[in-house]
Structures are given as C-alpha cells and as structure tokens.
Image: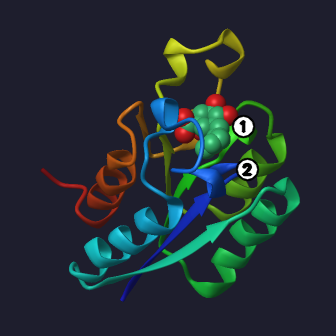
Amino acid sequence: MVKILLINGPNLNLLGQREPEKYGSVTLREIEEKLSCFIGARNAELLCYQSNHEGAIVDRIQQAQVEGVDAIIINPGAYTHTSIAIRDAFLGVQIPFVEVHLSNIFQRESFRHHSYLSDIAKGCFIGLGAKGYFLAAEYLLNPAI
Ligand code: CA2
C-alpha cells in the first residue's frame, strides 16, 4: 500500500486558532482527518507529523526512509526560508515530495520569496489554502493526467 507522510512545520499547530485571514479557519487536526479520508479512499495510507523543531523534522524525514514512505507532503512553515538542514535531509533520502504553502509567499515579504526546497521538490502548491494539501496528494497518487 502506498504510504504518504504529511509534515507540517513550526506554528502550523495553531492553524484555525489565530490569523484566519492569512491561513484560513480550518484546524490542522481537521486537515489531517480529511486528508486521511481522501488518501484512504484511494487505497493509500497517510501518516501525519507536526513539529516546531527543525532537527525533529530532519529526524522524521530520515525515519520516513526506514519506514518505506513513498512520498512526502510538506509545509515547512518558516523553515522554508531558512533550513539547509531540511533540504539536506530530503537530498539524503531521495523520497519524492511536494511543497505546500497556505498563503501565497510571493505576495508577502521578500524574505518569504525564497524557498530552500522548491528546486528539489516534485512541485509546489502555493497560495491555495488547505486545498493545496489535497492537490498535492492527488498528484502524488495519480501523477498522470
Ligand atoms: O503559507 C504558508 O503555509 C507558510 O508556510 C506559513 C508559515 C510562514 O512562515 C511561511 O512563510 C508560509 C507560517 C505558519 C504560521 O502558522 C500560523 C497559523 C496560525 C496562526 C499563527 C501562525
């Protein structure tokens, strides 16, 4: 069975509780539950992980290799713009991944315009809110048109 790992980075545990105008009103738990159903209905399995700690995210990516995870969906939060360590973790495991951002990072401050992951990701869904996670899953499970 295809195994997909969803990783959410720092502060995304607060989704739906603060700044709904920026990040929407759906909670992370709701996203995880709905995405699990979406992926389960396609005979695949979803593992969910959120951490506010860079090294813990690196550990989880390395562990994914051991577990035989087939693909990763990641919203690295602010680590998108800072983390060479998370980039190196992906280069080390060679698990295909899709990068998701709820907000359109290109409409925001210039320091959010660069991602350390986008050029090594399969692709990115940016600025489409929580729908981006589902579009990423749909792509990973069914990449052909
Ligand atoms: O748009 C995205 O998904 C981001 O990855 C969100 C990050 C931000 O640093 C990136 O530039 C773009 C911030 C996540 C903060 O999440 C919160 C959620 C609710 C309340 C407060 C913060």
Residue shown at 82%/65% (left/top)? Answer: 56
Q: Label 2, on which residue?
A: 10
Dot 2 falls on a residue whose secondary structure is: loop
Q: Residue furthest front?
A: 17
Quarter placement of the N terminus: bottom left
**Up/down of 1 relative to 65, above or below:** below
Residue shown at 34%/61% (left/top)? Answer: 137
Q: Amino acid at mark 1?
A: Ala
Q: Nearer the viewer, residue 130 or 46?
A: 130
Instruction: Give the x, y percent position of residue 128.
Output: 35, 35
Disc 1 beta carbon < 8 A from ligand 1? yes
Residue shown at 12%/50% (left/top)? Answer: 145
Q: Is residue 43 left or right of residue 26?
A: left
Disc 1 crowd rating (10 Å Cα; few below 14, some 14-19, many 20+) is some
Instruction: Give the x, y percent position of residue 91.
Output: 69, 53
Disc 2 crowd rating (10 Å Cα; few below 14, some 14-19, many 20+) is some
Q: Amino acid at mark 2?
A: Pro
Colour treatment of the image:
rainbow
Instruction: Give the x, y percent position of residue 77.
Output: 66, 42
- Tags 2 and 1 touching, CB below 8 Å: yes
Answer whether residue 82 is visible to the viewer in this image. yes
> What number is the disc on residue 78?
1
**Up/down of 59 relative to 3, above or below:** above
Q: Is residue 6 left or right of residue 55?
A: left
Residue shown at 63%/52% (left/top)? Answer: 14
Answer whether residue 116 is visible to the viewer in this image. no
Task: Report how far apart the C-alphas of labels 2 and 1 lie in the structure.
Answer: 7 Å
Instruction: Give the x, y percent position of residue 85.
Output: 83, 48
Q: Nearer the viewer, residue 27 or 144?
A: 27
Disc 2 beta carbon < 8 A from ligand 1? yes
